[in-house]
Image (cartoon, rainbow, N blue to C red):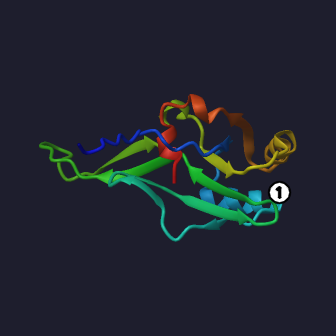
Amino acid sequence: MAAVHKIIGDFYEDSFTLIALHSSIEDYAIVYAINLGIKSIFKRASKDLELSEHMSFPFFEWQDELHDRYWVLIGNESTKKESLVREGLFKDESSFVKRHLVPEYKEVDYFIKIEHDDDLDMDRLLKSLKSLPKMVTAYSIDADKLKSKNNLIF
């Protein structure tokens, strides 16, 4: 008789810290400000994060080898141009649809995901992020309580 093996779908258990950022500036400007403010070296990834053909998010990463941490800064909003078949006055006009990486937090502009094994001084990091120009606020989010946690696995 052959053995039956079952694969559990939710086997990804890597721990990470998630920080929400509220800022109205563009992604390249926020990365520049963060690099200056916390002495990071975020660089644009060669490809954006694409969850589907309608969802693409700007993606910046930094491998902090000194502290053995992997940082990702990613936008929460994706605006894609869609052509809809319509009749009437606006039949040739395209529409733009906004989608979010983490729909539970639609008001968040950017997320910082930090994969690490050691203790991270969150209070100092959040204070540094909040002090950046054009940064409205920054706060930590419990990623285990998110319904869309799988969108953050990349």
SS state under label 1: helix
Which residue occupies 62% across, 46% down?
111
How many numbered dots are placed on residues in this image?
A: 1
Q: Which residue is label 1 attached to?
A: 37
Q: Amino acid at mark 1?
A: Gly
* Quadrant of the rendered image containing residue 99: top left
Q: Is residue 28 above or below residue 152?
A: below
* Left-right relation of 42 to 130: left
The residue most toward the front is 1
Which residue occupies 32% across, 55% down?
53
* 106 and 117: which is toward the camera: 117
Label 1 crowd bin: few (<14), some (14–19), many (20+), radius 10 Å: some
* Left-right relation of 102 to 118: left
Q: Is residue 36 above or below residue 139?
A: below
Where residue 16 sits in the image (x, y, percent)? 66, 45
The residue most toward the top is 145
Q: Locate the N terminus and report the quarter of the image it occupies.
A: top left
* Left-right relation of 71 to 123: left
Where residue 151 sits in the image (x, y, percent)? 48, 44
The residue most toward the bottom is 46
* Left-right relation of 38 to 146: right
* 23 and 123: which is toward the camera: 123
Where residue 112 sits in the image (x, y, percent)? 66, 49
